[in-house]
Amino acid sequence: IGYRTNAVELDLSDILPSDIEAQVKEAAEISMGTEISEEDITNIRHLCSQVIEISDYRAQLFEYLKNRMMAVAPNLTVLVGELVGARLIAHAGSLLNLAKHPSSTVQILGAEKALFRAMKTKHDTPKYGLIYHASLVGQTSAKLKGKVSRMLAAKAALAIRVDALGEDTQATLGMEQRADLERKFALLEQNASKRISGTGKMQAKFEKYQKNTEKGQFNQDQASTLPQKRHSDFGGRGGANKRFKSNNMNKSFVV
């Protein structure tokens, strides 16, 4: 725009919508401020051109990174995204070195200082590192971020090994794992909302208790917990013709 007097005649429809264009022109006409010199306008325009060039260069770098990551690690890219996947590979040194790490290390990769500080002071260790910036972790609630990070790191460790050692260039495994994780995360969010609102107890169904009305005959022998007397094979219950053995005479006799 330059000077405020040029705002009325300038056409901004190429870069701005019609409603925003009208607001910009109105603000330029009624805004308070002093007039600026030609040197200031030149410097401002130079800075604006630098910002536009940096923005275009950033877009080119992101497009290159996206294509490169889909060629090197397609399954990891589908799970955690291009930027997070590139940071994990750069932190480990290479894709092969990253494949050697277990899922617990992938989960806290990038939070080594916080981990050693927590171990030294005997506090709680961190639950996530670079994987915290993944889209799947960012869209969950704060209470579930630790659990979601652990589940995502387990799937990401498998995807990294497939990308590093496998021959398949398609992201079939990553798509399946992402769909599975999204389904599990939705269930976690649903269960967490039920636990907070208390609607889970209302949905519980209990069957009505029905008493057994059939009458049976009471059996005293089955109800008693005392040991039953052992009957002799010789005389039965009457006690007759019991055989005893004398310790002194070593002879047996019948009563």
Image (tube, helix red, strand yellow):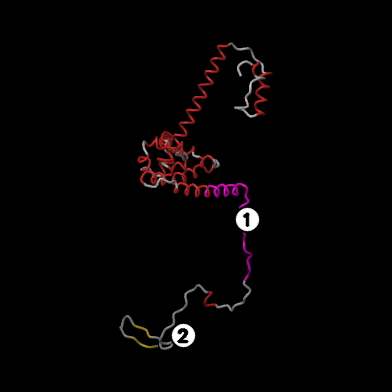
Residue sitting at x 50%, y 21%: 50
Q: Would you place residue 197 above or below residue 235 in this image?
A: above
Q: Which residues are magenta?
A: 184-211
Residue 209: percent from left, percent from top: 63, 66
Q: In the image, which disc is placed on residue 237?
A: 2
In the picture, residue 68 is in which quadrant? top left
Q: Nearer the viewer, residue 174 or 243?
A: 174
Q: Looking at the picture, does residue 87 appear above or below residue 164?
A: above
Residue 160, position in %: x, y?
40, 44
* Left or right for 169, reference 248: right
Quadrant where the N terminus is found in the figure: top right
Of mark 1 and mark 2, the one earlier in the sequence is: 1
- Residue 92 falls left or right of residue 7: left
Q: Is residue 186 magenta?
A: yes
Task: Check disc 1 and report the residue beneath it.
Answer: 203
Magenta stretch holds residue 208: yes
Q: At which x and y percent is residue 202?
A: 64, 54
In space, the residues marked 1 and 2 are separated at their CA atoms by: 63 Å
Q: Residue at x 47, y 75 (%)?
A: 227
Three-letter amino acid code of the residue under disc 2: Arg
Q: Point out residue 254 in the picture as x, y percentages from the top left corner.
A: 38, 88
Main secondary structure along the magenta-highlighted residues = helix
Instruction: Name the quadrant containing residue 208.
Output: bottom right
Alpha-carbon neighbours of circle 2 within 10 Å: few (<14), some, or many (≥20)? Answer: few
Secondary structure of the residue carrying tag 1 is: loop
